[in-house]
Image: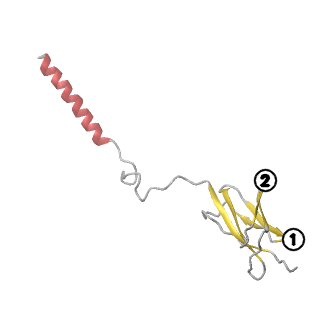
């Protein structure tokens, strides 16, 4: 009798486990693997701003100083444009507006804005300096 009761308990526990196994809800999206193409990657909080410093004739302005001003903290970062006029600011926050402009030999470009609402991963802003002014 004890043996039959013990076997019955084991059977009930096994049935409960099996029933539980079939009632666990699957994650949304069909429960595919983590490499499923419909899964989004973690939210990226920074991006890279690139651009070129050009004169009014679309020629590169080498060695111009490019300024990137955080409008929230007023912190300013600078880089020097390459010989072909290109510049690059890595790790720019997605949650802040920035002002960007360039200077060379006392001449200044117009100030452009990189908005936090601009959702490009690698925004590209060209700056123009009238070096003949």
Disc 1, SS: loop
**Disc 2 packing (10 Å; few <14; some 14–19; many ≥20):** few
Residue bearing the label numbered 1: 105
Distance from disc 2 to disc 1, alpha carbons, whole Å, reads 23 Å
Query: Quick check: 54 left or right of 132?
Result: left
- Callouts 2 and 1 close, C-beta under 8 Å: no
**Residue appearing at x 76%, y 83% in the figure:** 57
Image quadrant where one finds the N terminus:
top left
Q: Quadrant of residue 102?
A: bottom right
Q: Nearer the viewer, residue 115 or 125?
A: 125
Q: Nearer the viewer, residue 97 or 24?
A: 97
Between disc 2 and disc 1, whose residue precedes?
2
Q: Position of residue 76 (x, y in %)?
A: 79, 56
Residue bearing the label numbered 2: 75
**Residue appearing at x 16%, y 24% in the figure:** 7
**Residue appearing at x 43%, y 59% in the figure:** 38
Query: Quick check: 15 left or right of 125?
Result: left
Q: Position of residue 70 (x, y in %)?
A: 75, 56
**Residue appearing at x 12%, y 21% in the figure:** 4
In front of the other: label 2 or label 1?
1
Query: Quick check: 45 left or right of 128?
Result: left
Residue 6 vertical position relative to residue 64 in the rendered view, above or below: above
Q: Quadrant of residue 71?
A: bottom right
Q: Quadrant of residue 126?
A: bottom right
Image quadrant where one finds the C terminus:
bottom right
Q: Nearer the viewer, residue 4 or 104?
A: 104
Residue 94 vertical position relative to residue 26 in the rendered view, above or below: below
């Amino acid at each position: 009798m004890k043996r039959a009761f013990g076997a019955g308990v084991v059977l009930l526990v096994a049935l409960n486990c099996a029933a539980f196994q079939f009632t666990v809800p699957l994650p949304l999206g069909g429960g595919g693997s983590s490499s499923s193409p419909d899964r989004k990657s973690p939210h990226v909080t920074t991006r890279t701003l690139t651009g070129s410093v050009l004169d009014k004739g679309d020629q590169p302005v080498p060695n111009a100083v490019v300024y990137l001003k955080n409008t929230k903290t007023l912190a300013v970062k600078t880089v020097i444009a390459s010989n072909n006029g290109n510049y690059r600011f890595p790790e720019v926050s997605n949650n802040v507006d920035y002002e960007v402009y360039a200077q060379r030999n006392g001449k200044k470009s117009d100030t452009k804005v990189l908005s936090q609402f601009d959702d490009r991963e690698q925004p590209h802003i060209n700056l123009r300096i009238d070096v003949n002014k």
